[in-house]
Amino acid sequence: MKDVFHSNGFKILIVTVFVLFGVMLVTAGSGGSFAADAFGFLSTPMERVSTLITNNATVAAQSVTQSKDELEAENARLKQQVDELNRKLINYYTYQQENAQLRKFLELKNDNKDFKPVSAAVIARDPANLFYQFTIDQGTLAGIAVYDPVITESGVAGWVSSVSANYSRVTTILSPDTKISATDKVNRESGVAGTDVKLSDQGIVKLGMLSAGTTVKAGDIVVTNGLGGIYPRDLAVGTVKSVKNDPYDVSLYAEVTPFVDVKTVRDVMVITSFQGQGQALDDNTKPASSSSASSQGGK
């Protein structure tokens, strides 16, 4: 028990009690002003801290709101810049395509003074068509008519089989409806280039009606010869792959791989006028569907 009264904890307790008792006496004698002052002394720093925290929170909230508005405005500006860059990029690709077509146009025009070509782009393909028919973005407003030959810088792609004001459909060289009067450029032997469903599936046309003693051989280049008035002369058709016997008669035919891949072609030239166009049109050289096509347009 004696140890308890002499402990530090007990001494602190006694001091605290006397302090509190003294405060009570002073408060009672001063009408409570001292307590109020003491409370004010203790509470004022706390109020200042609270006010500071509140002010900081308000400033932070305003800063967040301002930052959000600034971010939204910046995003709007960036989106506008992206849209503008996209427009410029589209224009760039358009100009690039037009320049490439113009170069081909000038080369073709310089080599063939009598040609009146119109450049066009492939805008659609018919997935249901077995012979890779496609649609181009030029029509009668550009001077295009049915039967106009369609080519690329590599050679013959096909012919215009139907036409409207702003677009045309092209029947390709791989269609059985296509007949081209052609010549082996090496030995000058001529025939009619066409195809059938089986050969078309292999991407091949055949130069038929060759004589039994033909000298046509693999590697020879086949070109148009101008007969029939559908194609001008000396347009590249393809390369001879092999020479075979025709199973239906005594003649021979040459399998020819076209220079133009009509499955992937993107830019073409339509020859709307050339020397000898439409002359001596006969059943051996005109397209098989010409009777129906001629009712849709022409020159």
Image (cartoon, rainbow, N blue to C red):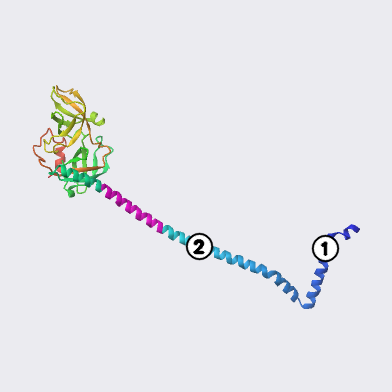
Q: Is residue 100 magenta?
A: no
Answer with left or right where residue 159 lies relative to residue 68: left
Label 2 sits on a secondary structure element that is: helix
For residue 19, which quarter of the picture? Answer: bottom right
* Picture quarter with the N terminus: bottom right
Give the crowd class for mark 2: few <14, some 14-19, many >=20 residues within 10 Å: few
**Element class at badge 1:** helix
Q: Main secondary structure of the magenta part?
A: helix
**What residue is pinned by disc 1?**
12
Q: Which mark is residue 43?
A: none
Q: Can you give x and y, in whole percent of width and height, for residue 161 in the image?
A: 18, 40
Crowd tier of the residue under label 1, counting other residues whose Cα lies within 10 Å: few below 14, some 14–19, many 20 or above: few
Say if residue 271 shows up in the picture: no
Q: Earlier in the sequence, mark 2 or mark 1?
A: 1
At 60% from the left and 66% from the top, the residue drawn is: 54
Instruction: Using residue 153 as the reference point, say whether residue 28 is left or right of it.
Output: right
- Please provide percent x and percent y for residue 116: 15, 45
Which residue is painted at 81% across and 74% down in the image?
Answer: 25
Q: Position of residue 39 (x, y in %)?
A: 72, 71
Give residue 218's quadrant in the image. Answer: top left
- Residue 250 falls in which quadrant of the image? top left
Placement of 199 over or under 229, stated as above or below: above
Please tell me which residue lies in front, 249 or 107.
107
> Can residue 207 be seen here?
yes
> Magenta segment range?
77-97
Give the residue pinned by disc 2: 65
* Amino acid type at mark 1: Ile
